[in-house]
Image (tube, rainbow, N blue to C red):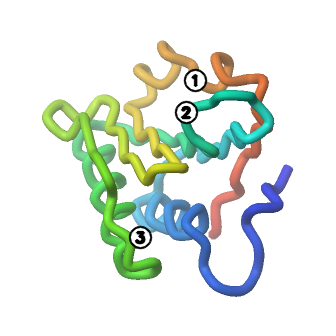
Amino acid sequence: MVNPAMKNGPVNLIDAIVEGIQRKKGLEIVDIDLQVINNSECDHYIICHGTSNTHVDAIAHSIEETVEELKNEPVWHRDGYNNAQWILLDYANIMVHIFQEPIRRLYDLESLWADGLIYNIEVDN
């Protein structure tokens, strides 16, 4: 399913984040729309994974650089760069989770937040 928040026209923040992920070949990109859940901490979780700590680090840096480039918006908070198993980028209403695959499967945020609307984002070829 395609997220209706991802529209044609001016680049929105979700589009910019996804572009940053795709630039470094992030895997299994998911957008969980949390706006349908009362009292959620943000509006969206964007989740993806990489194949190593180097790959996860590269994806996270790419997201930060791409969002700055396309939206001129800095990340509010970042965490997890030290071991790069799970990096969190906080853009206020959008939280981006970049995992190594085994850590992603362990925490399984998609199941934890299954009450949200879950959109699988197609990768550009």
Q: Please identify the quadrant where the C terminus is shown.
A: bottom right
What is the CA distance from the residue labelled 3 to the residue labelled 1?
23 Å
Which residue in the rendered view is the most extreme toward the left? 82
Residue 106 or residue 96, whichever sits in front: 96
Residue 46 spot, x, y in % from top left: 56, 45
Residue 102 or residue 111, whichever sits in front: 111
Residue at 32% across / 38% down in the picture?
87
Give amino acid for label 1: Leu
Which residue in the rendered view is the most extreme toward the front? 39
Q: Which residue is mark 3?
A: 67
Vertical relation: 104 (above or below) 21: above
Q: What secondary structure is found at the residue carrying circle 3? A: helix
Ranked by sequence position, the earlier of labels 3 and 2 is: 2
Residue at 82% across / 56% down in the picture?
2
Ranked by sequence position, the earlier of labels 3 and 1 is: 3
Q: Which residue is mark 2?
A: 41
Nearer the camera: disc 3 or disc 2: 2
Q: What secondary structure is found at the residue carrying circle 1? A: helix
Residue 41 spot, x, y in % from top left: 55, 33
Q: What secondary structure is found at the residue carrying circle 2? A: loop
What is the CA distance from the residue labelled 3 to the residue labelled 2?
21 Å
Q: Which residue is mark 1?
A: 109
Task: Assess disc 1: are there few (<14), some (14-19) or many (≥20) residues with their C-alpha within 10 Å of its C-alpha.
Answer: some
Ranked by sequence position, the earlier of labels 1 and 2 is: 2
Residue 115 spot, x, y in % from top left: 78, 24
Residue at 43% across / 20% down in the picture?
102
